[in-house]
Image (tube, grey):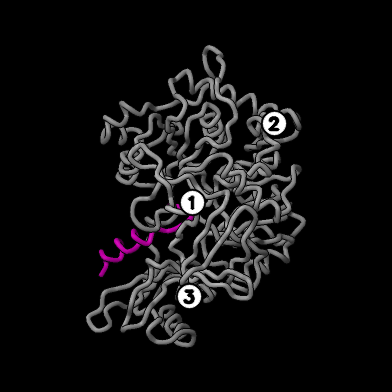
Amino acid sequence: MAEVTTHFSTWPWQHWATERPSAAALSFGEQSFSWHEVSERIEEYAQGLIEQGVKRDQLVAAIAPNSVQLVWLFLATIRIGARYVGLNPRFSDVELNDILDELKPQAIWLPPKSTFLPSLQEQTPALVNTGQILRLLPAIQPRLVPVTWQPSRAVTYTLTSGSTGLPKAVVHTAEQHLASADGLLSLMNFTADDSWLLSLPLFHVSGMAIVWRWLYRGACIVIPKASDFSEELQQVTHASLVPTQLQRLLTVTLTDTAQHQLKEVLLGGAVIPPTLTEQAELAGIACWCGYGMTEMASTVTVKRADVSSGVGHVIPHRELLVKEGEIFVRGASLCLGYYRNQMIFPATDNAWFSTGDLGEWQNDELFILGRADNMFISGGENIQPEAIEKVLLTHPKIEQAFVLPREDDEYGQRPIAIITTALPLDVGLVAELELFMAEQVTSFKRPVSYFTFPEHLRGRGIKVSRLQLKQWLETLL
């Protein structure tokens, strides 16, 4: 992968501090930093971590939403040769403790006033004693950071989306992240004069990928404040969004194309309605969509969004094979492996990684059919939940849809729909949906019951855990 990293003979921010020292590099609210200032700030915080005892190859866990402090922490962590893992702060205390017990990080960072710290100290005192609580401060006594740029070193552990069970910690090197960025940016028009909004969380691979695209291109990254998200989205040229974020933006703020600078959007995380991308294109926003996964450091295939439900073509530095209906991938962005029991284990026994996703090629475009482990049988017929979900999402009043099996004495299992709707899910809307689905799909694929998506599972991440939905559903049936 020499073609990906040859222009970085040192840390990417140090490279850009030399090449473009005064160019805008990072923005947060009223604060703005040049590449020279970014490089200096990372160095100061890296020295601070060393002063607190963080060592090379140790694991630093951050339990926090996106912020400028979190970005500094991440970059300072890898600068000293340590490894970074982000944890979703909206996880329950039990979930966080389970994950921390599995990872056993040597250091933990939480934002000021975090509500998790008292629980952490109470429930896992041994872990707190061995994994110190970090502060993000420059060193009291400036010191040398004795770690050089080595792109093949492990730098990040990124948790899988956790759609089933406890998420795995996927290990990537800087070189693998840069290969991911290089492949996507060979198609998207993202230049050094552009800006990308850090619109997705750093505990998810899609958020992490934004940071590496920024570092690869030497452009500007904008870190939004929660209260100003829509306004700041209008001030950037690029963003990674889930469809609901784009829909909210178009509905509320982008009635006049002169109000925004947004040029391109990368969509993911859910089925993308063609009407949404058509509306965005009319507003002057080029929409891209694709298929990716944590193990491949984000995107694997991509295309300009259109009426087709396919996910496009394989991008540079990746390869994809469909064998007996299952998707296999490999390439320069494939992870080193999974971290467990204080060791890194390979993700595959050979060059090809088994994704567990089902797909097929149609006219040289990849179509995702669903997860092999999501399929269930109803009355002797194979049911792929994702196929039913796609149909449900074509109804104008449905914003989010998940289909799960319910045990049935006669059929074995029957499909149940859990949905988010624009209007309350009352008897009238259920009748409307039943009539709609009767016109769209054969009888054994029609949901036999509809439930409103549970409030306590909203905002838990980009992907929703089907296991948690199943557990919630079992309490109702």
For label 1, the SS is: helix
Question: What residue would you read off at disc 2?
Answer: 15
Number of the front mark, 3 or 1: 1
Q: Answer with mark 2 or mark 3, whichever residue precedes in sequence.
A: 2
Q: Position of residue 429 (x, y in %)?
A: 44, 78
What amino acid does circle 2 point to?
His
What amino acid does circle 3 point to?
Leu
Q: Which mark is residue 93?
A: none
Question: What residue would you read off at disc 1?
Answer: 295
For label 1, count other residues whose C-alpha is less than 10 Å away and answer few (under 14), some (14-19) or many (20+): many
Question: What residue would you read off at disc 3?
Answer: 392
Q: How many marks?
A: 3
Q: Position of residue 434 (x, y in %)?
A: 42, 83
Q: Is 458 a magenta residue?
A: no
For label 3, count other residues whose C-alpha is less than 10 Å away and answer few (under 14), some (14-19) or many (20+): many
Q: Residue at x 63, y 38 (%)?
A: 29
Judging depth in this view, the residue of 240 and 183 nearest the camera is 183
Left or right, 177 with reference to 442:
right
- Cα distance between the residues tagged 2 and 3: 49 Å
Q: Compared to 285, does 123 lie above or below?
A: above
Q: Answer with mark 3 or mark 1, whichever residue precedes in sequence.
A: 1
Q: Answer with mark 1 or mark 2, whichever residue precedes in sequence.
A: 2
Q: Is residue 421 visible?
A: no
- Cα distance between the residues tagged 3 and 1: 29 Å
Q: Which residues are magenta?
A: 460-477
Q: Residue at x 63, y 31 (%)?
A: 11
Q: Residue at x 53, y 12 (%)?
A: 141
